[in-house]
Image (tube, coloured by chain):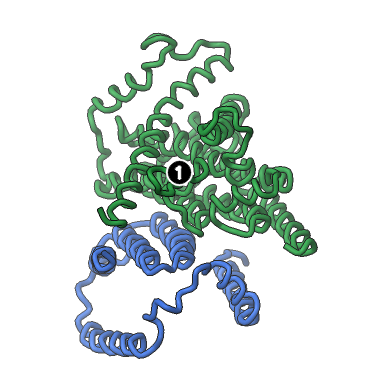
């Protein structure tokens, strides 16, 4: 077997594993979120389907798949369907640059647990994060409904504003690590023996806010606003066509961005070897789901901002803060001869 | 293997560009344009210019196209100029000019060193950053000032104030 075919097969296996795990976990996060929300609000959450309601995601999936498909009159049908793809694809592609552990040797081959170890990994993250805006805009526009369109415009404004802040917030970490590659950033933290969250606390908080805004989580979820816009841009979608949007936005995006946050600020897979060769994966997933838990926790605790405040906070407070943070970091790195 | 990737990407690019010019609905046109931008980014990746591919997606596919999309989706559809047939006169003048420019660029690339993969750099991000902030610092800053002026001008023109 030639070298090319072999690397192609390895990559396909990696893609299958990451896709299967991400989609499965995404589905089960719905169960986790409802359970958690229930307990936060002194309810029980799902209890009927299976033990502890564990089969609830399956029941939901069957319900969504067997619903009658309805397309609103005057909708632009190709764009209506394309919007679903445009919403899901960037969220999945984010997983392609996440390193889940250090490289290991299998049958005499060096294998890295990352799908694409490119030297522009962080650029890919920004690009995919902003490409998600098209799913929102086109779903709102194509469904030919005022509510959906207002929701999609709000979301577009939020994504554009927060994507800028996200880019500038992350630059501090890039300056410290000296590379844009995700494995390189993790390696830099392991070599220095310190997580970058201690050097870049401001950047981490800004990143967290951007993550909440981009994935439509409270308190920046003005584009969803269940009570005012009946969840905004996806209101005209039904069945599994509807199910894709929360899956991509609330679960896949939150998981992927949490993983990126772990890579940037929490030392990636580093941690004491308590599980032998599996401990890097354990630490990575533990940190990542710690963040996911935090996001869901916030969602069921806080009220939301007003529509105008969300973008104003981004442009007038967070962006200047991010710029000051970069200049400060750059000066310090330069002084210390980095 | 390279020719297969290149073939698929360039076919994708040609179809998208054709679609962007030929479809009547402006939203479909902008979607084809977006697809063309993504295909170009893919071509850059296939040629080993990773930074260029990333910037192509961030700057063109997102920052620029998204504003076209916002403008097009919010335009009142009654006032939009309708399709008024193929512009034949412009086509007669346009096509020879296009072929001429294409031939000139192709000749330039063929004679120059652009198609030589031996001069490719390993760490293009670092090199580009260094070049941009040392040898080309002044043009770079001038370009940013021009963009700033254009932005202020657009805001002034767009404001409705007496």
Can you say which quadrant of the picture contains the C terminus of chain B?
bottom right
Instruction: Name chain B's colour.
Output: blue
Q: Which residue is mark 1?
A: A113
Residue B92 relative to residue A258: left or right: left
Report the quarter where the N terminus of chain B lies: bottom left
Q: Residue furthest front?
A: A108
Judge from the rendering whether residue A54 lies leftward or rightward of residue A174; answer left or right: left
Q: Quadrant of residue A289?
A: top right
Secondary element type, mark 1: loop
So how many labels did they put on this image?
Answer: 1
In the rendered structure, the residue with mark 1 lies on which chain? A
Which residue is rendered at x = 27% and y = 56% of the image?
A2
x, y percent for residue B40: 36, 67
Say which quarter of the image contains residue A197.
top right
**Percent position (x, y) of residue A124?**
48, 55
| Residue occupying the far right of the picture | A335
In the image, residue B75 sits, relative to residue B104, either above or below, namely above
Q: Report if residue A295 is visible in the image.
A: no
Q: Is residue B36 left or right of residue B19?
A: right
The image quarter containing residue A293 is top right
Q: Position of residue A23 (x, y in %)?
A: 38, 34
Colour of chain A as rendered: green
Q: Residues within 10 Å of mark 1 (few under 14, many from 20)?
A: some
Toward the viewer: B9 or B159?
B9
Q: Eyeballing the image, is B37 above or below A94?
A: below
Figure check: A166 above or below B6: above
Where is residue B69 drawn, in percent x and y?
Answer: 41, 58
The reply to whether residue B105 is in sight is yes
């Amino acid at each position: 077997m030639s070298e090319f075919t072999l690397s192609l097969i390895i990559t396909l296996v990696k893609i299958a594993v990451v896709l299967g795990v991400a989609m499965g976990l995404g589905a089960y996060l719905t169960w986790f979120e409802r359970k958690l929300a229930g307990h936060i609000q002194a309810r029980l959450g799902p209890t009927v389907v299976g033990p502890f309601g564990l089969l609830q995601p399956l029941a939901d999936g069957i319900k969504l798949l067997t619903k009658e498909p309805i397309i609103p009159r005057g909708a632009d049908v190709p764009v209506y369907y394309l919007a679903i793809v445009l919403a899901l694809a960037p969220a999945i592609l984010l997983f392609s640059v996440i390193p889940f552990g250090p490289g290991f040797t299998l049958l005499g081959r060096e294998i890295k647990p990352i799908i694409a170890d490119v030297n522009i990994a962080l650029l890919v993250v920004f690009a995919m994060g902003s490409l998600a805006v098209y799913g929102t805009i086109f779903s709102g526009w194509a469904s030919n409904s005022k509510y959906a369109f207002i929701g999609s415009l709000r979301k577009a404004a939020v994504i554009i504003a927060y994507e800028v802040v996200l880019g500038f917030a992350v630059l501090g970490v890039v300056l410290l690590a000296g590379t844009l590659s995700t494995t390189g950033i993790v390696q830099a933290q392991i070599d220095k023996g310190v997580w970058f969250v201690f050097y870049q606390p401001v950047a981490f908080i800004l990143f967290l806010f951007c993550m909440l805004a981009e994935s439509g989580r409270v308190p920046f979820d003005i584009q969803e606003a269940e009570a005012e816009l009946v969840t905004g841009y996806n209101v005209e979608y039904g069945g599994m066509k509807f199910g894709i949007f929360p899956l991509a936005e609330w679960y896949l995006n939150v998981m992927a961005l949490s993983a990126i946050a772990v890579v940037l600020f929490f030392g990636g897979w580093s941690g004491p070897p308590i599980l032998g060769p599996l401990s890097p994966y354990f630490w990575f997933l533990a940190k990542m789901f710690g963040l996911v838990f935090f996001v869901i926790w916030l969602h069921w605790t806080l009220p939301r901002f007003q529509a105008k405040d969300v973008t104003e906070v981004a442009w007038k407070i967070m962006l200047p803060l991010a710029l000051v943070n970069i200049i400060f970091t750059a000066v310090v790195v330069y002084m210390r001869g980095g | 293997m390279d020719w297969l990737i290149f073939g698929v990407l360039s076919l994708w690019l040609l179809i998208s560009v054709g679609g962007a010019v030929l479809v009547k609905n402006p939203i479909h046109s902008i979607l084809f344009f977006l697809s063309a931008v993504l295909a170009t980014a893919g071509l850059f990746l296939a040629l080993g210019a990773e930074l260029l591919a990333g910037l192509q997606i961030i700057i063109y596919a997102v920052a620029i196209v998204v504003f076209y999309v916002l403008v097009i989706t919010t335009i009142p559809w009654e006032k939009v100029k309708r399709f008024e047939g193929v512009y034949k006169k412009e086509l007669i003048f346009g096509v020879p000019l296009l072929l001429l420019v294409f031939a000139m660029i192709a000749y330039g690339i063929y004679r120059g060193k652009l198609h030589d993969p031996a001069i490719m750099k390993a760490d293009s991000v670092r090199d580009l950053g260094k070049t941009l902030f040392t040898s080309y610092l002044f043009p770079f800053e001038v370009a940013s000032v021009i963009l700033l002026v254009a932005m202020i001008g657009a805001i002034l023109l767009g404001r409705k104030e007496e």
